[in-house]
Image (cartoon, rainbow, N blue to C red):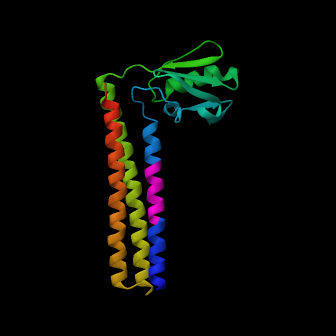
Amino acid sequence: MAAENLIDELLEDADERMSKSLEAAQHEFSTVRTGRASPALLDRVIVDYYGAMTPLNQLSTISAPEARLLTIQLYDKSSIKAVEKAINESDVGLTPSNDGNIVRLVVPEPTEERRREMVKIVRNLAEEGRVAIRNVRRDTMQHLRELKAEGEASSDDEHRAEVELQKLTDGRIGELDSVLKAKEEEILAV
């Protein structure tokens, strides 16, 4: 009975870690630009703020007042030049403009070529998510083998747990693939 409890705990832990990997991949997807303006687009922009590399969203309030416009209200107006430089050097592909108080980013309709590039980026992010999920499976399999080697679980227990773990893995990867498909459709929608 103790072996079943240990195995159940391992599987629950694996499920939780796979869910976190899936959530992380979904968050990464949100940072990839479609045709709409979203504050999440700027999540990966890092600004050299007086020598400290600081995420843009910690230096400002970012909002999307219109479908094709992002506004960045800086807490410290003297950092406008550093923010513009960071946006220009990032992979966001947007050109900032400012009026001395607010930085504006107009989100253009992406070209067909840019859409295809964004799909490639999203597919790479999805593959990183799949790898993270498989790594959780590999770690859990290792723990199961250790339990069997220590005599705390039988071969049958280990086999049942491996089958259950594979079902979990396939389910999470299936969820990731459906989120990827939806994101690709969102990117390619004209």
Where does residue 167 sit, x and y in percent of width and height? 33, 65
Instruction: Answer with the quarter of the image where residue 74 lies.
Output: top right
Where does residue 110 sit, x and y in percent of width and height? 36, 23
Q: Nearer the viewer, residue 2 or 140?
A: 2
- Most extreme residue toward the front is 66
Q: Is residue 8 above or below residue 68?
A: below
Q: Nearer the viewer, residue 92 or 167?
A: 167
Where does residue 103 sit, x and y in percent of width and height? 58, 19
Prevailing secondary structure class for the magenta stretch in the rendered image: helix
Q: Is residue 90 above or below residue 23?
A: above
Numbered range of the magenta stretch = 14-23
Q: In this image, 178 relative to 23: left or right? A: left
Q: Nearer the viewer, residue 172 or 101?
A: 172
Q: Is residue 18 magenta?
A: yes
Q: Nearer the viewer, residue 31 or 80?
A: 31
Q: Residue at x 47, y 60 (%)?
A: 17
Which quarter of the rendering shows the C terminus?
A: top left
Instruction: Answer with the quarter of the image where residue 156 lies.
Output: bottom left
Q: Is residue 175 magenta?
A: no
- Most extreme residue toward the top is 99
Q: Residue at x 31, y 28 (%)?
A: 189
Numbered-mark total: 0
Q: Residue at x 45, y 74 (%)?
A: 8
Where does residue 164 sit, x and y in percent of width and height? 35, 70
Q: In this image, 31 relative to 76: left or right? A: left
Q: Is residue 161 above or below residue 30?
A: below
